[in-house]
Amino acid sequence: MDLLLWITIGFIIIGFVVLTSIKKGMESKVAFIKANMEDEENSSKAKSIIWWMWSTAAWGIVSIFLVVWCFHNHFG
């Protein structure tokens, strides 16, 4: 198999495992923010949630780009 295909598969699988393992912590941070609306600690928790969402979106965009690039190289 081509190296690009292995890089694509590895990136998608490793990214999925990392994002799903961090998901539970993000859910608990959201629950904490909802329960303590006036707490000053919410700002740092909200920033980490926003960064997690941006990184998830970036991982998805890069994954789509890699899959398209892989198909382009194999079938183009």
Image (cartoon, rainbow, N blue to C red):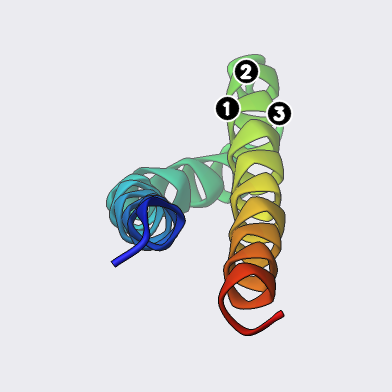
Considering every residue shown, the one lying at the far bottom of the view is: 75
Looking at the picture, which amino acid does disc 2 mark? Ser
* Image side of residue 4 versus residue 6, left or right: right
Label 2 neighbourhood size at 10 Å, few (<14), some (14-19), many (20+)? few
Residue 6: image quadrant is: bottom left
Considering the numbered disc 3 on the image, is that residue within a helix, a strand or a loop?
loop
Which residue matches tag 2? 44
Q: Residue at x 70, y 37 (%)?
A: 50
Q: Residue at x 45, y 54 (%)?
A: 4
Q: Which residue is mark 1?
A: 45
- Neighbours of disc 1 within 10 Å: few (<14), some (14-19), many (20+): some
Task: First in sequence, mark 3 or 1: give its number.
Answer: 3
> At numbered mark 2, what does the secondary structure look like: helix, strand or loop?
helix
Calculate the distance from the C-alpha at mark 3 to the C-alpha at mark 1.
13 Å
> Closer to the camera, 33 or 7?
7
Q: Amino acid at mark 1?
A: Lys
Are discs 2 and 1 less than 8 Å apart at CB?
yes
Q: Which residue is mark 3?
A: 38
Above or below 2: residue 18 = above
Q: Position of residue 47 (x, y in %)?
A: 68, 26
Q: Which residue is painted at 63% across and 84% down in the image?
A: 75
Q: Quadrant of the C terminus?
A: bottom right
Q: Report the mark closest to the observer, 2 or 3.
A: 2
Q: Secondary structure at mark 1?
A: helix
Marked residue nearer the N-terminal end (2 or 3)? 3
